[in-house]
Amino acid sequence: MLWKIRRKTWANKMVAKKAEKVSEYTRRKMSLAIVDVAWSNILCRDVSDDERKLLESPPKKQKVLETGPEGEPFTFLATAQRDGSVILWEMKTPVTNESDVSIATEIETDYHWPTALCWLHHNQGKVHSKDFLAIGSLTGELGLWQIMYKEHQTAAAVRVCDLWTEKDDMRIDYICWIPCETDPSYWYLLTMKAQHIILFLLSIPTLEEELASPVVLSSCVQNSLHTVPSSGLYSCPSFAISCSQDGSLQKVQPCYANNELSVKVDLFEKHPPIGPAHRGCTMTASGVYLSTLT
């Protein structure tokens, strides 16, 4: 009888060990599976006062750094992983060897599975040490993170606001930023979610407003003209183009007038009964030519 009890205990331990190994294998597999990628602006880390003085007036025998008093320029490559995290890869500009590429930080989003990433490309042409990253999930959540690069090459990611908290199981397919023409500090965040268009109007703090956080001013939801979820989204200076596998193309133009936020949707190309399925779209810089991947 005692022998049977010991044998049963040993079998339970073996089952537990195998289950632990399977769980660890699944976790590692998910952490290596990349779902989406996105490039940030050219950033530059803050330097300390001692470093700034050294860069501004270096010793006579010391070579003057070409980067100036702002520090070394770099860019972030954000990769969304299936385990719920977003890894930020730091890449110096330009990349000359393997040491110029490293992992800056890892964002624990608490999402089941991040599906869409989009950096806010603001302050164009200006050196800055922080940027904003919008992250959408498979279960429908949407959040905004602020990425700051401080002294001594330490990156910090802080969640500044939750834009959509409801887990409605309608995945965030695509995200894009569009500048608002009425105010340079206002930005539209356009989201393609299943067969819906969700638009947010945010007030983004300037470089001088270091302690300020983005503020959601308004939001609206409108149905898409696609019969199936969007398969591509391309943002232009004042509007966005989305495509779908039903063969349709639509123009999405946000508008903010008289303190009211709205979305105007025009169908460029109707979905044919039998025709090509669009899997991606892009447009030339001049805005004249539009190309699709079928």
Image: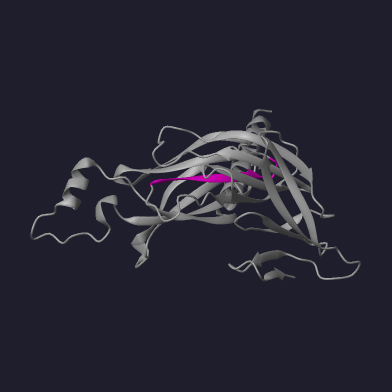
The residue at the point 58 percent across, 38 percent down is 202
> Quick check: 58 left or right of 103?
left
Using the rendered image of the protein, determine whether residue 90 is visible from the camera's viewpoint: no
Above or below 48: residue 289: below
The quadrant holding residue 138 is top right
Quarter of the image for the N terminus: give it.
top right
In terms of secondary structure, what is the magenta stretch mainly?
strand
Above or below 275: residue 236: above
Quarter of the image for the C terminus: give it.
bottom right
Q: Tell which residue pokes out farthest to the left in this image.
A: 60
Camera-side residue of 260 and 99: 260
Residue 99, image x and y in percent?
Answer: 34, 61
The quadrant holding residue 67 is bottom left
Residue 36, image x and y in percent?
Answer: 60, 55
Residue 132 colored magenta?
yes
- Report the coloring of the rendering: one colour
Figure disc tally: 0
The residue at the point 75 percent across, 40 percent down is 221
Camera-side residue of 4 and 279: 279
Using the rendered image of the protein, determine whether residue 25 is visible from the camera's viewpoint: yes
Residue 47, image x and y in percent?
Answer: 27, 45
Residue 141 colored magenta?
no
Q: Tell which residue pokes out farthest to the front in this image.
A: 258
Camera-side residue of 7 and 12: 12
Q: Tell which residue pokes out farthest to the right in this image.
A: 273
Read off the magenta span.
129-140
Residue 48, image x and y in percent?
Answer: 24, 42
Camera-side residue of 7 and 133: 133
The residue at the point 41 percent across, 36 percent down is 209
> Quick check: 228 left or right of 210?
right
